[in-house]
Image (spheres, rainbow, N blue to C red):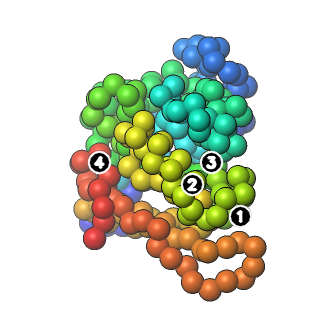
């Protein structure tokens, strides 16, 4: 396989063309757009014409759902300090794809309808590390249509920083456990650590490996691998990588 046939990288702009963020219920208006109509048509067209083994979508904020009414009341103020919800933890964050649910469903529905089985979304912005399977509605029990790998922040504060908790301490681990219980499309998360993700693309699979450092307050040795996950071609599911 020639290198140019391995992957197409599609990059979108989610800030300069969008309708301004609004809270629920106005965010549910089916006419609202984050991409802009021209860019959305371009994106769908690029997904359709790609003949590469993989379609990689560089996406500047989390596409998968990061909020649900099922989140326990006790931790809503905690997640409200992150970009996983609105500032109070009582609803979706209007600034990311959760704030444009109709357009997200349209894009992911197009992926499903066109039988695209090789889409990997690469995202950031929310300052925490996540691996998610993407659905038009993450809580409907439907099969995933794509996967998403979200990088952690380099230095921007995340959960332990904002709450004054110890890194990977019992408080953060408990919040992660609660969120994983109510959001089954989350396959792994780390809400504390700083670092980056390395993505390896081969014809058979796309592997994401998150690397973290123990502190960003001083120069310190010792990067560590936080997780190594992958999607095999045609499966649309996240599994552990060897």
Q: Earlier in the sequence, mark 2 or mark 1?
A: 1
Vertical placement of residue 167 versus 63, above or below: below
Above or below: residue 61 compared with residue 109:
below
Q: How far across and how far down the image is residue 13, in percent?
A: 63, 41
- For the point 71% across and 64% down, the residue is 155
Instruction: Give the residue pinned by disc 3.
Output: 126
C-alpha distance separating marks 2 and 3: 16 Å
Category of crowding for the residue at label 3, using alpha-carbon neighbours closer than 10 angstroms: few (below 14), some (14–19), many (at least 20): many
Tag 1 or tag 4, which sits nearer the N-term? Answer: 1
Which residue matches tag 4?
237
What's the distance in space between the residues labelled 3 and 4, CA to CA? 22 Å
| Mark sitting on residue 53 | none
CB contact under 8 Å: marks 4 and 2: no
| Disc 4/disc 1 C-alpha distance (Å) | 30 Å
- Residue at the image position 24 percent from the left and 48 percent from the top: 234
- Decide: few, some or many residues near mark 4? Use Cα within 10 Å; few <14, some 14-19, many ≥20: many
Secondary structure at badge 3 equals loop
Q: Residues within 10 Å of mark 1 (few under 14, many from 20)?
A: few
Give the left or right position of residue 184, taking residue 195 as reference: left
On the rendered image, what quadrant is the N terminus found in? bottom left
Q: Residues within 10 Å of mark 2 (few under 14, many from 20)?
A: many
Give the distance between the C-alpha atoms of the residues marked 4 and 2, in whole angstroms.
Answer: 26 Å
Q: Which quadrant: the C terminus?
A: bottom left
Q: Which residue is mark 1?
A: 155
Dot 1 falls on a residue whose secondary structure is loop
**In front of the other: 206 or 160:** 160
């Amino acid at each position: 396989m020639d290198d140019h046939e391995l992957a197409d990288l599609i990059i979108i702009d989610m800030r300069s063309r969008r309708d301004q963020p609004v809270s629920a219920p106005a965010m549910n208006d089916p006419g609202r757009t984050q991409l802009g109509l021209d860019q959305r048509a371009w994106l769908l067209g690029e997904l359709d014409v790609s003949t590469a083994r993989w379609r990689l979508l560089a996406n500047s904020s989390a596409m998968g759902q990061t909020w649900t009414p099922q989140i326990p009341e006790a931790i809503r103020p905690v997640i409200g300090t992150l970009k996983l919800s609105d500032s109070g933890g009582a609803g979706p964050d209007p600034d990311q794809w959760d704030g444009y649910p109709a357009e997200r469903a349209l894009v992911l529905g197009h992926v499903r309808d066109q039988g695209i089985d090789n889409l990997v979304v690469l995202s950031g912005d929310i300052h925490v590390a996540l691996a998610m399977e993407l659905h038009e509605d993450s809580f409907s029990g439907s099969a995933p249509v794509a996967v998403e790998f979200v990088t952690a922040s380099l230095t921007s504060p995340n959960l332990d920083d904002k709450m004054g908790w110890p890194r990977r301490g019992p408080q953060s681990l408990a919040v992660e456990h609660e969120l994983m219980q109510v959001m089954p499309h989350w396959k792994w998360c780390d809400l504390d650590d700083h670092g980056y993700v390395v993505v390896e693309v081969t014809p058979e699979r796309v592997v994401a490996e998150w690397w973290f450092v123990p502190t960003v307050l001083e120069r310190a040795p010792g990067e560590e691998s936080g997780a190594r996950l992958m999607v095999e071609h045609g499966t649309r599911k996240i599994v552990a990588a060897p």
